[in-house]
Amino acid sequence: MTHLSEQQLVALRYDEVEDRSAVEQHLATCEECRGSFERLQKVLAAVEAMPVSPRDADYGRRVWQRIAPRLDERERLDWHGWFSAKRLTLAGAMAVLVLAAFIAGRFWPRQPEPPTATAIPPEVRERILLVAVGEHLDRSQMVLVELVNANPPATGEVDISGEQRRARELVTANRLYRQTAQQAGEAAVASVLDELERVLVEIANSPAEVSTVQLAHLQKRIEAKGILFKVRVIGSEVRGRKPPIPSGAARSSS
Amino acid sequence: MTRMEHGAAQAVEISDAARVAQAQAGDREAFRLLVERHSHTIFGLAYRMTGNEYDADEIVQDTFLRAYRRLDRFEARANFGTWLYRIAVNCSLDLMRKRKTDEQRRVAAPAQGEESDCADAFDQMPTAQPSPDRLALSGEVGRHVAVALAALSPVERAAFELRHFEGLSIEEIGRALGLRESATKNSVFRAVQKLRKALEPLVVRNR
């Protein structure tokens, strides 16, 4: 029998070799192949010995805290879930309410109609959106900067309830802007908003008072992702893109 | 596996099945328990796949979100852990491909229309540089292992992870990665071959 191929040695290691007894017989008599197989085992043992970054016993609970607020969002996107019996009941109830509102509207005295969003020209709408996104990014940036620059005391806990409250408010707006950016094909903006949302959710779900270790973890996460830098870049890009308001349009929308 | 370990594994499985059934009926608390039970294992898989704790954290979250969204497609007879693993591997592959796309865009913005041809090429490319945290955790051999793992393509890495660490059969890996049997075998082989080439001189020298 000629020497064993590398493929046969790998197959032997994973117990997938076709003619096992012949291969084992060859190994018993061939020092060269035995040496190759031992070296392969050593290489794989070294790979196995690679440490995994440790996660404490509370890790599962933290994962849940981070994903719990996002479960509803996913449910809304899931058509299977949408057609579940519970949701159909809810949809039925909503339909009754809408119908009742429609009938009531038919007999209610009419007020003069306020200007609607459709009266606003696209350029102005785009400008409003860009301004809103720019301001949202500024507010998010402030929360992140405050957390990154927070100086923890040597012992005790740090109160981040203010940042947490603001992060919670920003998450909802962020989700809307992200979805809008996705629909508009603004991949770069959507991607940064997606990363920002994950960090904001993590801040929102942190305890109101964090230990110095937890704060350091939060700061490390913000810094490692480079999210602050990305938010700054996208923020300035968005502000630089504001289209001018046509004078006629501005008048008609005011 | 000892009888006690087998009994414990069975107990987890039975209890998983019960929790999944509750979660499928809309019980979030049951899903929370599943998340808390499996987070560490999924993190281990994701960390070995990406070599980066932040990406691994992201994959853990995405895995459970996807699992929640697809709960109604989970069959009661299947093993929840294995099912979750399959989702985690796909989340890892998605993220690794996304990272590479981002990296490519940063290095040289490609002309439009080129991207569609790159999907297969991505699977042949190294995953990434090993992260500083992974390097910091390792000694000299560990550092070389991290570099060698990072040089594997996402598919090679996934196939190797599932074969070597999780002990899945070639057939199961093929199903998880959407590959034919021969392609799965080749991916595992190529991964081992690359690791061997990169590490053998070092491992043999150090022993």
Image: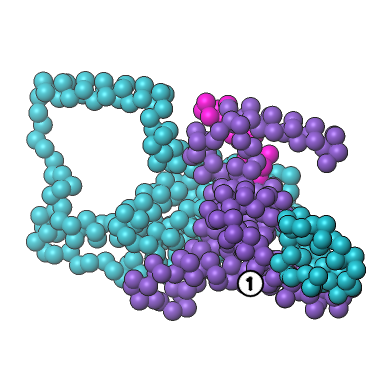
Q: Could you say whether the residue bearing mark 1 is in a helix, strand or loop?
A: loop
B191 vs B80, nearest the viewer: B191
Q: Which chain is cyan?
A: A
Q: Quadrant of residue A217?
A: bottom right
- Can you identify the residue that label 1 sits on? B151
Circle 1 residues within 10 Å: few <14, some 14–19, many ≥20:
many
Residue B128 x %, y %? 59, 70
Is residue B21 rendered to the left or right of residue B146? left
Q: Which chain is purple?
A: B
A46 vs B128, nearest the viewer: A46
Q: Is residue A112 visible?
A: yes
Vertical placement of A117 versus A52: above or below? above
B202 vs A167, nearest the viewer: B202
Quadrant where the N terminus of chain A sits is bottom right
Magenta stretch bounds? B22-39
Look at the magenta stretch and give its main secondary structure: helix
